[in-house]
Amino acid sequence: MASKFLLLFKPFQRFTLEVKKPARKPSFKRKIAWTFGILSLYLVMLNIPLVGVPSDEGTDPFFAMRAILASQRGSLAELGIGPIVTAGLIMQLLVGSQIIKVDFSNPEERALYTGTQKILAVLMTIFEALAYILGGAYGEDIGFEASMLILVQLLVAGFIILLMDEIIQKGYGLGSGISLFIAASVSFNIFDGMFSLSPEPSGGFNWFRGCVLAFFQAIFSDDPNATMSTPFSRVGRTPDLIGLLATIVVFAVVIYVDSIKIEIPVQHSQYKMPARYPIKFLYTSNIPVILVSALFANIYFISNLMWNNWKSAASGLKYFLVRFFGTWEDISGGTGSQQLAPVTGLASYTTAPYGPEQIAKYPVNAIIYLVLMVALCGIFSRIWIDTAGMSSKNVAKQLLDANMQIPGFRRNPRIVEKYLERYIPTAAWLGGFFIGVLAAFADFLGALGTGTGILLTTGILRQYYEIFASEQVSETVPALAGFLGLK
C-alpha cells in the first residue's frame, strides 16, 4: 500500500504531462540528436530575456549559485534546474527519514513516487519564482502586473525544463537533462573565466576578466600598474590563475579517484564463467553534491528574501529570522561592481568562501561550511543507495536474477546481501565524505565555475563517456545490450 502522502498527490498527477517511454529503443544517432536538440533549446532559453524585467536590474543576489543551478540572470532559465533538484531532495529526505515508505520494486508505487516528485517540482518553481520577485531580484517597484507576468513566464519555462529532463531520462536522449544542463553551464563559466574580454578595472589598470588573457596582459603591457601578481590572485569573484590551477587539479583527482574500485568475484551459476562485479569508491558519483547544493541554494534564496524585506527590523520575530538565516554585505573588495553575499547566519555557513582572501576574512564560516558539506554529502550518499536501487539488497537481487553467484556462497538473497553489506554502505559513506571534501577545498581555492560545479561536471563528462562507449558497443554487438542494461 502506497504512503498516504503519495496518495494525497495522486488526483493532481493527471494535470501534469507525462512523457511516455519510446515503444522501440531509439538508435544511438537518434539519441545524440535528441540530446543536442534539447541542450540547444535550453541554451536558447538561457538567452531569452524575461518580459517585464527592467533593463537595469542591479546586482545579482544569486550569483554564487548560477553555475550549479545552470541558470542565467534575467532569462527564461532564471531558476534553472533548482526546482527539479529541490523536489528530488525533499523526496529523498522524506524516504530516508521513513516519513514515507515506498516499495521501489512495485511499478505502481514507483510511478506514484515519480508523479509526486513532478508535482513538487512545479510547486517549487512557484515558490522560487515568488522568492525572486518578493526578494527584489527584479527591483522593488515593478508593480503587480509585471510581477504576475514574470511569475507566469518562470512557471511555464520551469515546466518546459521539467519535461526536457523527463524526455532525456525516459530514453529518448543520453544521461539526464539535469546533468547535461549543469555540464553545459559550468563549461561555459570555465571558458568565460579563462578568456572573457569583459573589463575588470583594478589597481589603476584595465584588466580583462579572463585570467589567461590577464596573464598575457601582465607579460606584454608596458603599464607599471600591470603587475605579474594580479592575474594569480584577484579579489572578489574575479577569476585568477590559482583558481584555474585548482580547476585542473580537481579534474585530475576526480578522474583518478573514479577509477578506484573493489572487484567482487562472481561467476555464472550454470556455466561457472568467472567475472568481476565492481564497486566504485565514488559509489554514488556526484549525486550527493547535487542534493547538498540544492539544500544550500534554498537556504541562500530564503536568506536573501528575508534580508531584502526585513533587514530594517530592529526587534521581534523578523529580526530573529534575518539574523538566523543571515545578514548580507558587499564582498566585491572595491572592484567597482557591488556584489552582495551573506556574511553571518545560516546562509553564510552554507555558502563557500571564495578564494583565500574570503577564507582569511571569515575562517569560522569556512570551517563550518567544510563540516556541513562533508557530513551532508555522506548522509545523502547513504540515503541515495536505498532510494535509487543501489543498496546491497538490490544488487544481490540483480546478481541472482542474472544467474550469477559469489563463489563459495549459496545463491540465497540474504546471504549475498550480507556479503555485499561489507562493501556497499562503506563505499557510499566514504565516497560521499571524499566528494564533499574535494568540493569544499576547490571552492576555497577559487576554482573556475565553483568547486562544486567542477566536481559535478567532471563526473558528468565521465558518465557520458561511459554511456557513449556502452551505446556504441550495444549497437555493434546487440547481444550485449541486455548485459549492459540498455534494452
Image: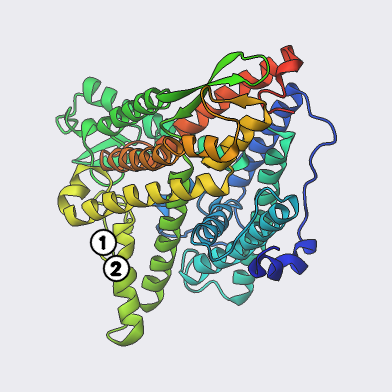
On screen, residue 235 versus residue 426, left or right, reads: left
The amino acid on which the numbered mark 2 sits, given as a three-letter code, is: Thr
- Where residue 16 appears, as percent x and y from the top left, is 76, 59
Which residue was labeled with disc 1? Answer: 343
The amino acid on which the numbered mark 1 sits, given as a three-letter code, is: Val
Q: Note whether residue 51 is visible.
A: no
Q: Are marks 2 and 1 in contact (CB under 8 Å)?
A: yes
- Where residue 36 appears, as percent x and y from the top left, is 67, 31
- Where residue 375 appears, as percent x and y from the top left, is 33, 51
How many marks on residues? 2
Q: Which of the 4 quarters of the picture holds residue 305?
A: bottom left
Q: Which of the 4 quarters of the picture holds residue 220?
A: top left
- The scheme the figure's colours follow is rainbow
- Name the secondary structure under disc 2: loop
Q: Quadrant of the C terminus?
A: top right
**Vertical side of 382 occupied by 132: above or below:** below
Q: Residue at x 59, y 38 (%)?
A: 413
**Vertical side of 104 occupied by 423: above or below:** above
Identify the disc placed on residue 327.
2
On screen, residue 229 versus residue 135, left or right, reads: left
Q: Earlier in the sequence, mark 2 or mark 1?
A: 2
